[in-house]
Image: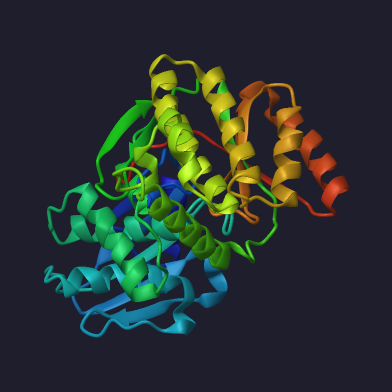
Amino acid sequence: MKETIKRQFEAFFGKDPEAIFFAPGRVNLIGEHIDYNGGCVFPCALSLGTYAAASKRADEKIRFYSVNFKNSGMIEADITAIEYRKEDDWANYPKGVVYVMKAAGRKIETGFDVVFHGDIPGGAGLSSSASIEVCTAVLLNDFYKLNLPPVELAKISQAAENRFVGMNCGIMDQFASAMGKKDNAILLNCNTLEYEYVPLELKDETILIADTNKKRELAGSKYNERRAECASALEMLQNGIKIKDICALTPEKFEKYRRLITNGTAEKRAKHAVYENARTLKAVELLNKKDIAAFGRLMNESHVSLRYDYEVSCKELDVMTDLAWKQKGVIGARMTGAGFGGCAVCIVKTAAVEDFKNNVGTAYEKATGMKAEFYAAQTGRGAGKL
């Protein structure tokens, strides 16, 4: 891809790029819907991501071009007057990073030409937006000698999406992209940004993303609903015990005090949060022992909990995971992301990947009338200059 994007830059701008940068996409392997309950997420960076070939300019103009959005043509901006423009579509994400950097007083005194080319499937839930944000942050950090550490680049990228684009995302996606490490996942507390690298050595296995192609129509409203239900459960628990977050409880303590939650729905939501956090912490222990099979079983348990206790799955995700669990060579499979559509993440023996795609793809279409798409990846490095 490095040579490909170099040629693309030369063809579009008529000169060689000064440098090429990369930022990966990510997938959350386990630890779903617990970051706002005081729990930990467990993402890994992927080998798929966003590449950028760029050169500095002598003036204040920025020229953006994306191979993935050719119909948009070249989009221009001026570093002295960065503003959100709906018609700029995808370019608002890198523009937002420039905006946040300059608003913080970072010295970016000249513009640049840049070509982006991502091999992350759009809309597959692998965080292409965070990838292009972090890729831009790394580019700016290098070109303008800002000397910012990767964690700061993640924060800037999140701020660009929150404040400039207007999407109220958490920091997991940008953090995983900036801080990723090959053959490792990251145990991350999104509130404190405390993190730990955990070995995820997939020598004979592949991370397979199974896209249901079911759009997440309910995800936003149901997300707010689940947060309110968890807040209610926490308030009832706090009538009898001193805890700051639901995930401060172990499963044993939850079973002892769950009677304090007098609403059945809120009790189920709290149960998921407690047990999902315990599964995430157990995943660290298992992967440190290189027990990928047991980790896969935790992934399966996670989906069951998301399906029945947290109720954020949907027919299409359930069909996908049910089919995956029956396939030869599958280590584990679960929905990933907000739910109500989107993707499942599966760990599959590499030798069984093609059979998985054929068998599951055929059976999924028969059961749902929809075509699934599959994307194979490995754990990847964090963002940087190539």
State the count of labels. 0
Is 161 placed left or right of 219 in the picture?
A: left
Question: x, y percentage for residue 138?
Answer: 26, 54
Question: x, y percentage for residue 257?
Answer: 44, 38
Is 75 placed left or right of 318 in the picture?
A: left
Is 58 placed left or right of 209 in the picture?
A: left
Q: Is residue 76 visible?
A: yes
> Residue 102 versus residue 170: which sits nearer the camera?
170
Residue that appears at 51% across and 41% down = 271
Question: x, y percentage for residue 290?
Answer: 44, 16
Quarter of the rendering occupied by the C terminus: top left
- In the image, is residue 99 above or below residue 150? below
Say how the picture is coloured.
rainbow
Say which quarter of the image contains residue 163: bottom left
Q: Is residue 138 visible?
A: no
Residue that appears at 34% across and 34% down = 181
> Residue 9 versus residue 123: which sits nearer the camera?
123
> Residue 120 versus residue 69: which sits nearer the camera?
120
Question: x, y percentage for residue 175?
Answer: 32, 49
- In the image, is residue 195 above or below residue 153? above
Residue that appears at 65% across and 44% down = 308
Residue that appears at 40% across and 74% down = 166
- In the image, is residue 250 above or below residue 291? below
